[in-house]
Image (cartoon, rainbow, N blue to C red):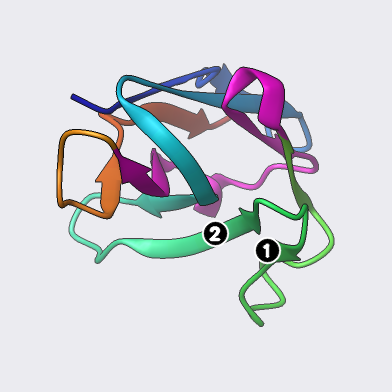
Amino acid sequence: QVQLVESGGDLVQPGGSLRLSCTASGSIFAIYAMGWYRQAPGKPREFVAAITSTNWPNYPPSPSLKGRFTISRDNSKNTTYLQMNNLKPEDTAVYYCNAQINSYDSDAYDYWGQGTQVTVSS
């Protein structure tokens, strides 16, 4: 069973920073990509960032995110990180880790973590 576990969410003031982490574990043959989505109350899940196994980052075109969030990964630890700077109240959401994984014991491809809460408020 493949599992993704996020951590790092917290309550911060506007302009503050957080670093989220997500670690994959289980029957993993290969991780092709890892990334982050977020979901605010009453809103659909929104793509935030992703990174491939070759360390190629991908971001949405939205100017609300570009330049503030940076994704990275440590392949030796099956972990991805999301560095979030200059946080704004509109960044408040549950942040979910997503990964594209080839597993030894499952035909599934996309996996999701349980989410970590980020709250930006003064």
Q: Relative to the observer, which residue lies in front, 38 or 102? A: 102
The percent position of residue 28, horizontal first and vertical second, equals: 38, 31
Q: Amino acid at mark 2?
A: Val
The percent position of residue 54, horizontal first and vertical second, equals: 75, 55
The percent position of residue 106, horizontal first and vertical second, equals: 15, 41
Q: Residue at x 68, y 63 (%)?
A: 65
Query: What numbered label is drawn on residue 25?
Result: none
Q: Residue at x 47, y 30 (%)?
A: 119
Left or right: 51 in relation to 10: right
Q: Amino acid at mark 1?
A: Leu
Q: Residue at x 39, y 64 (%)?
A: 46
The percent position of residue 103, horizontal first and vertical second, equals: 29, 39
Q: Is residue 87 magenta?
A: yes
Mark 2 secondary-structure assignment? strand
Q: Is residue 80 magenta?
A: yes
Task: Please report whichever mark, 2 or 1, sits nearer to the chain's N-terminal start.
Answer: 2
Residue 60 position (above or below residue 122) = below
- Farthest bottom residue in view: 61
Q: State the residue position of label 1.
A: 65
Mark 1 secondary-structure assignment? loop
Q: The C terminus is located in which quarter?
A: top right
Q: State the residue position of label 2.
A: 48
- Identify the main secondary structure in magenta: strand
Q: Relative to the observer, which residue lies in front, 6 or 93? A: 6
Q: Quadrant location of residue 77?
A: top right
Q: The N terminus is located in which quarter?
A: top left
Q: What distance separates the C-alpha of mark 2 from that of mark 1? A: 7 Å
Q: Quadrant location of residue 58?
A: bottom right
Labelled pair 2, 1 in contact (Cβ < 8 Å): yes
**Which is in the foreground here, disc 2 or disc 1?**
2
- Farthest right residue in view: 67
State the extent of the magenta-drawn residues as a range. Answer: 74-103
